[in-house]
Image: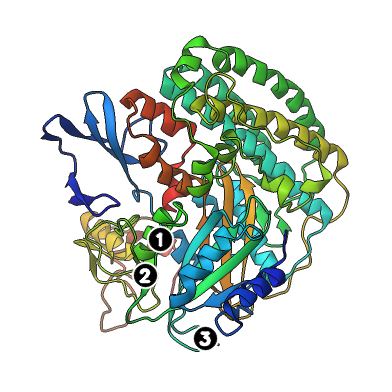
């Protein structure tokens, strides 16, 4: 069993301190590597008998666009690892350029990456190269865009379904017209269009409004 | 609507049978009664034998991770219930633990005990439903009703604790929402004496039943190597013979203070890691939960049920922490990244059912259709937990 500092030192001894950057923001320790070094680092983490990270616990896609303190608008792929043999854990993250979000897939090392990378592709548009089938997982095939990106905006229609709804007050207006202008007791009427005298309802169209409280 | 499998190959369109030579493409679900929640499988079969079984998920996707970015930290708490509505306590616990780790909050010991008690109660309730549903999928309807009866009792106890029967919102950041009600402890101890006798009843009805054994033994065995590389967690992992339980091996909360065993799959009726093993491991886990509950109820210390919390929860920007807890469906990982403001920058849940789905296509090759039903049921998959 090794703690995060020992694992970081071992990685830096293997690959050189300039290629393994400590992730200061990770509470339980972790490192940042570049896209080119990712596969080597991960393979070393898995195959070295002292490290023996046999369980890829989680793949998380993160969008850093607009995060205070972040130097760039990169996407990030974060891997949580655990070793059943050695009972220690570690995390590795890799920053991916936003305009060309390509990163090697981990599916050849851990089969659990197949679904988790599909999810990160689906929600953040990170392209995992050499993945056996990088298709959408949770969202429909026809869905456009990647909704967990910070610059994603919901359109007026998503797959032909409107994303806006009538306000409930409009439904009440329909009810109001259908009842012949009668307002159910307890409801005041902001429903009438503003008249020349102001917003006050006319007394004959709202017989029950006497008992209802006035709402401005 | 066209559909592609995970190898990018076109496998047909929705709700349509396609026949190619001897191969029949068959749609199973999304409303198939034996799938747990809204799940869909596309089966490529040769007669009764499955050539491929391709899961199609996402019907219950409610963008919980996205909601987590739009709510305040404590405002997100009720949404975590919906990650897994059969065992809502665990997602509560997982998220609360991740945020507490981010803020470095120490909990009062009574709060930790209350968390363990509610977790273990919920684990029993969830396993009861999972076991009952598996028995029902195989054809035994009666045990399901017995299990639901017991689950109702447990729901009533949890309702007294927090006012809810399904989505509890009991565990909060910094503790739990309510202390124990008056007399609850003794009544629960009495109930546990009763419930202990239900497990032999379940064993007589299902576990030792010859039909059940023949339907589940040697069906869908998963080796330890496969289970680890596909990332199976919890009871599914342990039934493949991997001796690992987060409560014992990477303890959180106050679990080191209790004595309990970790049941493993032994291959009693067939191969290690078959459907029967997964069933039996869950039955034995319920027994261990009873033991933990008894110890916790007898040892519970006095004190507060909430820690002193800062007025505003505002973790530093970019700082991230995660928690791992042993949920009813195996290890759940909750991960939170602070934004410097009152909302999280990113929230992530990695759940047990999600990982279990990934292995179905691999293991189900060459199975009979009826065995696939037993296999899926034995993994104890809950659809909302996959889709989140």
Image quadrant containing the C terminus of chain A: bottom left
> For the residue labelled by badge 3, is the local secondary structure a helix, a strand or a loop?
loop
- Residue at the image position 66 percent from the left and 40 percent from the top: B243
For the residues beneath circles 1 and 3, the answer to whether they share a chain is: yes
Q: Viewed as shown, does residue A141 lie left or right of A44? A: left
- Pick the front one: A172 or A126: A126
Q: CA distance from mark 2 to mark 3?
A: 19 Å
Residue found at x 48% / y 71%: A38
Kindly indicate whether the residues beneath marks 2 and 3 are on one polypeptide chain.
yes
**Badge 2 element:** loop
Task: Tell me the chain of label 2.
Answer: A
Would residue A168 be seen by someone viewing this image from the given angle? yes
Q: Quadrant of residue A128?
A: bottom left
- Give the residue displayed 46% in from the left and 68% down from the top: A39
Give how far across and how far down residue B229 sits, in percent.
Answer: 50, 49
Whole-number angstrom distance, CA of label 1 to CA of label 3: 24 Å
Tell me which label, 2 or 3, sits earlier in the chain.
Answer: 3
Q: Are marks 1 and 2 in contact (CB under 8 Å)?
A: yes
What residue is shown with label 2? A126
- The residue positioned 53% from the left and 18% from the top of the image is B143
Whether labels 1 and 2 belong to a single chain: the reply is yes
Q: From this view, report whether residue B326 is shown above or below residue A6.
A: above
Circle 1 or circle 3, nearest the eye: 1
Please, is residue B368 above or below residue A8 in the view? Answer: above
Judging by the rendered image, the residue that carries numbered circle 3 is: A70
Please give the residue where the numbered disc 1 appears in the rendered image: A117
Secondary structure of the residue carrying numbered label 1: helix
Tell whether A51 sits left or right of A113: right
Image coordinates of residue B144 in percent, x first then y, are 51, 22
């Amino acid at each position: 069993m090794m703690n995060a500092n020992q694992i970081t030192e071992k990685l830096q001894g293997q690959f050189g301190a300039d290629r393994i950057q400590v992730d200061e923001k990770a509470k339980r320790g972790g490192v940042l590597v570049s896209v080119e070094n990712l596969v080597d680092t991960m393979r070393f983490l898995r195959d070295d008998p002292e490290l023996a990270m046999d369980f890829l616990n989680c793949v998380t896609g993160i969008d850093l666009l607009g995060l205070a303190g972040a130097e760039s608008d990169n996407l990030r792929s974060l891997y949580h690892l655990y070793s059943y043999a050695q009972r220690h854990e570690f995390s590795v993250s890799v920053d991916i350029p936003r305009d060309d979000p390509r990163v090697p897939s981990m599916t050849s090392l851990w089969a659990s990456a197949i679904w988790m990378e599909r999810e990160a592709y689906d929600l953040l548009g990170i392209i995992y190269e050499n993945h056996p089938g990088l298709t959408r997982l949770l969202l429909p095939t026809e869905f456009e865009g990647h909704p967990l990106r910070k610059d994603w905006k919901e359109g007026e229609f998503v797959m032909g379904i409107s994303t806006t709804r009538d306000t409930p007050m409009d439904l009440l207006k329909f009810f109001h017209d259908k009842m012949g202008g009668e307002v159910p007791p307890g409801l005041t009427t902001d429903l009438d269009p503003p008249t020349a005298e102001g917003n006050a309802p006319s007394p004959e169209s709202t017989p029950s409004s006497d008992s209802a409280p006035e709402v401005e | 609507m066209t559909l592609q499998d995970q190898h990018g190959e076109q496998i047909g369109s929705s709700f349509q049978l396609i026949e190619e030579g001897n191969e029949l493409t068959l749609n199973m679900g999304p409303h198939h009664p034996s799938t747990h929640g809204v799940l869909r499988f596309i089966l490529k079969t040769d007669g009764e034998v499955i050539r491929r079984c391709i899961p199609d998920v996402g019907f219950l996707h409610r963008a919980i991770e996205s909601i987590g970015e739009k709510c305040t930290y404590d405002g997100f708490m009720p949404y975590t219930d919906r990650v897994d509505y059969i065992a809502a306590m665990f997602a509560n616990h997982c998220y609360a633990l991740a945020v507490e780790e981010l803020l470095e909050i120490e909990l009062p010991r009574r709060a930790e005990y209350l968390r363990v008690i509610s977790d273990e109660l919920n684990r029993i309730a969830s396993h009861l439903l999972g076991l009952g549903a598996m028995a029902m999928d195989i054809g035994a309807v009666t045990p399901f009703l017995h299990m639901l009866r017991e689950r109702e009792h447990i729901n009533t106890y949890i309702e007294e604790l927090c006012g809810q029967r399904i989505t509890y919102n009991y565990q909060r950041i910094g503790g739990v929402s309510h202390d124990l009600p008056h007399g609850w402890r003794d009544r629960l101890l009495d109930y546990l004496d009763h419930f202990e006798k239900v497990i032999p009843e379940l064993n007589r009805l299902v576990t030792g039943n010859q039909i059940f054994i023949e339907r589940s033994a040697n069906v869908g065995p998963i080796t330890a190597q496969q289970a680890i590389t596909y990332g199976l967690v919890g009871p599914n992992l342990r039934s493949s013979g991997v001796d690992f339980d987060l409560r014992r091996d990477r303890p959180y909360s106050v679990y080191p203070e209790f004595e309990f065993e970790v049941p493993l799959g032994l291959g009693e009726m067939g191969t290690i890691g078959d459907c029967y093993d997964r069933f039996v491991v869950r039955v034995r886990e319920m027994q261990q939960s009873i033991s933990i509950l008894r110890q916790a109820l007898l040892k519970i210390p006095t004190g507060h049920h909430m820690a002193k919390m800062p007025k505003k929860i505002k973790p530093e920007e970019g700082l991230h922490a995660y928690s791992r807890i042993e949920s009813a469906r195996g290890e759940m990982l909750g991960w939170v990244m602070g934004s410097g403001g009152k909302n999280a920058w990113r929230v992530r849940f990695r759940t047990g059912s999600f990982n279990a789905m990934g292995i179905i296509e691999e293991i189900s090759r060459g199975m009979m259709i009826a065995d696939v039903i037993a296999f899926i049921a034995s993994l104890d998959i809950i659809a909302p937990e996959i889709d989140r």
